[in-house]
Structure formats: C-alpha cells, structure tokens
Amino acid sequence: MSFENGSLTHDRSQLLGTAANERHSKQLFYGWWVVLASAIGLFWCVPIAVYSFSVFFKPLMGHFDAGRGAVSLAFTLQLIAGALCAAPMGWLSDRYGPRRVILVSTAFFASILLANRMFSGSIVQFYGFCVLMGFAIQGVGPIPYGSMISHWFDRRRGLALGLTMLGIGLGAVIIPSLAQTLIARFGWNTAYSILGASVLLICWPILGYFLKEKPQHLGLLPDGASSEAERGEGVRQGLTAREAWKSADFWLMLCAFTLVSASVQGCVVHIAPMLNDRHLGARSAALGSSLIGAGVMIGRVGIGYLLDRASAARLASILFAASAAGIALLLLGNSVGAFAGVFLVGLGLGAEIDLMPYLTSRYFGLLNFGKVYSSLFAAFTLAGALGPLIMGAGFDRTGSYRDPLIVFLVAVVVAAILMTRLGRYRISVPPPENQPILAVRVADDNSRGNIAEVQSNKQL
C-alpha cells in the first residue's frame, strides 16, 4: 500500500529538478575558461612582436649600424606582412575553426623567435625575420581569438572580449620591461630566444588543453544559457561578407580605425626613443612602453564592460578623443605631460582592439565574422605599419617628432568624428540577464509558470 499521492510525487520531482538547476547555475560557464586561455595566448605573443619592439629599437640600431628610419622599416614590413595575412587568417578561421589556426600559428611564432640568430647577419636579413613574424602574428592575434569568443558569448560579449584582449594589455605592461632586462643581461638575440622558448613551453600547452571551438561542442549554449529562449538573436543572424563590404557603416569603421591605427602605432613604436631624447634614460623609456600597456589594459577592461551597456560608436568617439589629447601632450607637454600622453595613447589603442570585433558582430553578425573582421583588421594593421615609418622618416628629415605628431593629432580627431556617424546596430543585442528568473527557478515551487511568464515578457 502506497502512502504517496500524485501531488506529492509531482512536488518531489519538481524539487529534484529545482535542485539540479541550482547546481547547474553554480557551475562556472566553460566559456570563461576559454576567455582565460585566450588572454594567456594574447599575453605571450602579440606584446613580444609589437609592444616590445620599442625596447629593441636602439640595440638594433647599434648592432646593424642603422638609422631610425631603417629600423622602423623592419617594423613596417612586419605589419605589412601581417596585413597581407589578415584576410587569409579570417578565411581559415571561418573554414577550419579558430582553435586550429591559433595552435599552428603559436608554434610557428615561437619557432621564429628561437631562430632569430639566423637573421642577425644584416639589417636586410632582420627584415626577413620581421616579415616571418608578421606572417605568424595574425594567427596568434585578435582575429581568431575574437571569432572564438564571439561564438561563446552573446549577451556578455563585450565583457568577454574585453577580458580576452586584456591579455594584450597585461603583456604590454610586463613584456617590454622583461625584454629590457633580458637585453641588458644577455643581449637582444638571447632575449628573443628566451621569449620564444616561453611561448613554446608554457603558452602553447595551455592553449591546447583549454581552448574549445564553440559551446555547442560541449553541449552548451552561448553565455551558459539553459534554453534557446534565453539566447540572444545575434548568433543566428548576419550579413554575408559581400553585403557587409557594401555598407556605409563598414567604410566608416575602416576609415576611423585606419586613421587611429597609423597615429597610435607610430607613437607606440617610437615611445622609447622619444623619451630617450628627453634625457629620461633607458629605464624610463621602458616605463613609457609599460605605461602604454597600462592604458591598453584599462581601456580593454573598461570598454569591455561598457560595450554591453552603451553605444559602441559613442564610446569609440570619446576614447579616440582621449588619444588625441594624449598625442597633444606628447607634442606639447613636459616630461610629466609626456608620460600622461603615453597613457592616453595606450587607452585609445586598447579600446580600438576591443571595438573592432564587437562592432563587427553587432553590425554584421557572425555569419562571415572572420572575413569581415579580418578585412577591417588588415586595414588597421596596414595603417599601423605606415605610422612608425612616417614617424621615423619625419624625425630623420627634421630631427624632431613635431611634424608627424601634428599630422597624427589631426587624423585621430577626424576618426573620433567619423565614429559619431555610425547608425544603429543591425544585429539585436540581447537584454541583460534577469536575475529574479534564477531566484524563481531555485526557490519557488510554482517556478515553471513564473519562468514561462518572464521568458515570454523577455521575448516581447
């Protein structure tokens, strides 16, 4: 004889289901492990090739007996090679998945650094070394990582991208000073070799273990949503690459990012020699490079948090204006003002790297994300290649950085104005998470009816 009636059995099963949902809600969404691994990958690779070049600048001048323009050309060739590889990397990420692209490119990048002595016989050979780094850098940079994170997150995409790109900011703070220490103790060749070994022995295994292509491969949904009703629509919508390239919004973004990239990268590469010219010493010059990294880091986290809550175009305009102020301080300020200017330049650079993938996903969707984003990033990289060359050539011609800084100041102001001309997002942004839904799911015996009601309200 059973003493349990149907209602008690139903209540028990409902409580068991509630407990299961509570346990699931307390688990850390695996996408955040992907974010952490991606940040580590960006920490090790991009700052070595980009942000540390400034502290290698004068040792390279001494080793090759070359002028600033000649050494700047090495960095320019690296960025040109990277720009040429950006579109293929976007296509490969769409075709084979960003995880494969990242792992192969990371191993290739480390191997190039380890083989740097083979390219140290002349400045021309060193140009070859920089070109090979340029080929690798797009595969270990924001294109494949941005594609991967955009598939793992929708509602929290801005924050996830900001935390991911924070890896570059942290690396830009730490790696230049580390590289300066290694150069002072072992020379520039050994410094590159040690950095390459760290990429291969520490970074690559972490990426191989933690990176997963998409949440669906683990039976999950973006943002850790427990049902399709909680998902945003952005991951299911999108324009083809051809449609995106024909839109006015695409060309407004491309022009703005191009102008800022040339201006900011020109300042970044020449920060150390620019500060040395003010008799601040090698350590202060390395500190200046680290301040750029600090600005990048704060820009990454801050813009990532705000992107989910405010207009990305408006934020871009404000931060580009801050970069313009930074260039003005480099042009007009004293030593203290110059350090403040360095920080503001880094702030704009940090925001720009976060803004490109986010704006791509919101205006054009994820259908051909790799192709569209990589075309923007190619223009960004190519402009960044020209900036240092303009800076170095301007100094060699006049003996001062004044003229190129004036040009860059005007360019960044124009970019800030262009960002105000972007229209509304084409891809809908999911509403913020409704925390009371979780409370109802856990605590209320009548949760099914309440959840259905709240979800229907969300859809409305």
Image (spheres, grey):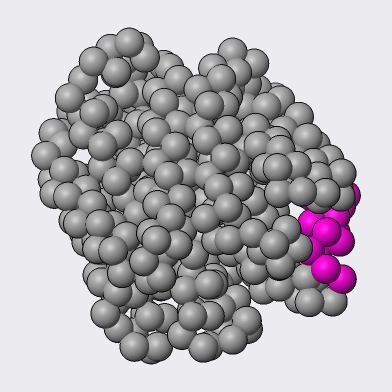
Q: Position of residue 390 (x, y in %)?
A: 40, 52
Picture quarter containing residue 238?
top left
- Residue 351 visible, this angle: no
Q: Is residue 249 above or below residue 335?
A: above
Looking at the image, residue 24 sits to the left or right of residue 267; the answer is right
Q: Is residue 340 above or below residue 459?
A: below
Looking at the image, residue 288 sits to the left or right of residue 64; the answer is left
Q: Nearer the viewer, residue 250 or 60?
A: 60
Residue at x 29% of width, y 18% of height: 244
> Where the N terminus falls, by quadrant?
top right
Q: Nearer the viewer, residue 103 or 255?
A: 255
Residue at x 49% of width, y 65% of height: 270
Q: Position of residue 312 (x, y in %)?
A: 26, 46
Q: Position of residue 387 (x, y in %)?
A: 41, 50
Q: Main secondary structure of the magenta part?
A: helix
Picture quarter containing residue 249?
top left
Q: Nearer the viewer, residue 195 or 38?
A: 195
Looking at the image, residue 50 sits to the left or right of residue 388; the answer is right
User: In the image, is residue 271 part of the stretch drawn in magenta?
Assistant: no
Number of marks present in the image shown: 0
Looking at the image, residue 424 sits to the left or right of residue 360; the answer is left
Picture quarter containing residue 265?
bottom left
User: In the image, is residue 197 part of the stretch drawn in magenta?
Assistant: yes
Q: Is residue 230 above or below residue 61?
A: above
Residue at x 23% of width, y 15% of height: 246
Q: Is residue 156 above or below residue 198?
A: above
> Where the C terminus falls, by quadrant?
top left
Q: What span is colored magenta in the figure?
A: 186-204
- Residue 284 visible, this angle: yes
Residue at x 85% of width, y 55% of height: 193
